[in-house]
Amino acid sequence: MNARLEWAKKSPAAYKAMNHLENAVVHSGLEHALLELIRLRVSQLNGCAYCINLHANDARSAGETEARLQTLSVWRETRWFTPREQAALAWAESLTLLPGRGAPEGEYGQVLEHFSEQEAADLTLAIATINAWNRFGVGFAMVPD
């Protein structure tokens, strides 16, 4: 597949806005490894080849194991993810698949069990931000280098 257009060059203001969101996520205090798991899982759900490649590599650089990366799409079927990670992944899946699932009360409760209210808001921003990045990646057919 060929990329459709270089959106960041065509709309520098959009790219700048996305970078501001990303900067807020990076400086939120949430663990880098957790953010990479969320970014990768959401990108898998959205089918963004560019972002899957990017965040799998970033997760490896952050110390993530191959076993966890290889089973991230079936994380519920393993024992390799902590309760905090499980709560974040479930929340990420729900917010990414909103029309089909909504934001279940039980998953929200799990988030608040493992995250402070500020962290819950920051986690939600991280999920919203990677979903937005995925829209640019999929919409403009970005491919890994």
Image (cartoon, rainbow, N blue to C red):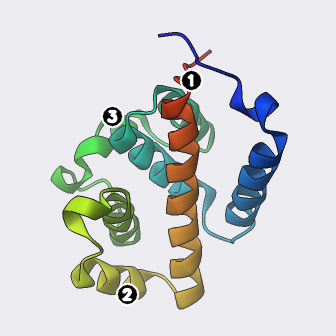
Horizontal and vertical percent position of residue 24 = 73, 66
Q: Which mark is residue 63?
A: none
The one of 69 and 135 positioned closer to us in this rendering: 135
Horizontal and vertical percent position of residue 117 = 53, 89
Q: Quadrant of residue 26?
A: bottom right
**Amino acid on which disc 3 is placed:** Gln
Horizontal and vertical percent position of residue 31 = 60, 63
The residue wearing badge 3 is 70
Q: Residue at x 25, y 84 (%)?
A: 105
Secondary structure type for disc 1: loop
Residue 40 visible (yes or no): yes
Q: Is residue 85 above or below residue 14?
A: below
The residue wearing badge 2 is 113
The residue wearing badge 1 is 142
**Amino acid on which disc 2 is placed:** Glu
The disc, 2 or 3, on the residue closer to the chain's N-terminal end is 3
Question: Is the residue under label 3 in contact with that under label 2 (CB below 8 Å)?
Answer: no
Q: Is residue 71 above or below residue 140?
A: below
Secondary structure type for disc 2: helix
Q: Label 1 vs label 2: CA separation?
A: 37 Å
